[in-house]
Image (tube, helix red, strand yellow):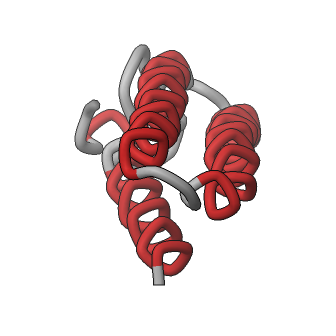
């Protein structure tokens, strides 16, 4: 159940970030923009998945230790998300009709 919750949270966060990912300066070639966004999201997903993969085995034992591991996991998730947001802002807006009018981060 926890792994499913983490996956749902990750999908929701990526969806929200992609919806508003047209920040930064205008006029970026669509292929460059797409590559930048895809690479950034891939790095973010990898960071979350790598940390989540070991989390289940670390949550056994005392409650205080499990809490520390969860705190560590969410710290990694927050740092990775902050990095993703910065990279999406740097990606700019795609040079397509309406690209400059897209929502901003």
Give how far across and how far down residue 9 sits, in percent: 39, 64
Name the residue rendered at 59%, 26% in the picture.
Answer: 28
Give how far across and how far down residue 52 sits, in percent: 64, 54
Name the residue rendered at 38%, 55% in the picture.
Answer: 13
Q: Quadrant of residue 8?
A: bottom left
Give how far across and how far down residue 57 sits, in percent: 69, 60
* Viewer can see residue 25: yes
Give how far across and how far down residue 99 sits, in percent: 39, 42
Please state if 99 lies on the left or on the right of 45 as rendered: left
Q: Nearer the viewer, residue 26 or 89?
A: 89
Q: Nearer the viewer, residue 101 or 40?
A: 40
Quadrant of the snapshot with the C terminus:
top left
Q: Which of 23 and 2 is in front in this view?
A: 2
Position of residue 71 relative to residue 49, above or below, is: above
Position of residue 18 relative to residue 32, above or below, is: below
Name the residue rendered at 72%, 38% in the picture.
Answer: 43
- In the displayed image of the protein, which residue is found farthest to the bottom? 1
Q: In which quarter of the image is residue 20?
A: top left
Please state if 54 lies on the left or on the right of 93 as rendered: right
Name the residue rendered at 40%, 35% in the picture.
Answer: 71
Position of residue 9 relative to residue 24, above or below, is: below
Please state if 13 lies on the left or on the right of 40 as rendered: left
Q: Nearer the viewer, residue 28 or 21?
A: 21
């Amino acid at each position: 159940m926890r792994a499913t919750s983490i996956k749902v949270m990750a999908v929701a966060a990526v969806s929200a970030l992609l919806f508003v990912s047209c920040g930064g300066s205008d006029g970026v070639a669509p292929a460059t923009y797409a590559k930048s966004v895809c690479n950034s999201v891939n790095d973010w997903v990898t960071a979350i998945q790598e940390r989540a993969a070991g989390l289940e085995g670390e949550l056994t034992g005392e409650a205080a230790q499990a809490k520390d591991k969860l705190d560590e996991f969410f710290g990694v998730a927050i740092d990775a998300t902050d990095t993703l947001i910065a990279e999406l802002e740097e990606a700019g807006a795609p040079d397509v009709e309406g690209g400059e009018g897209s929502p901003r981060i």
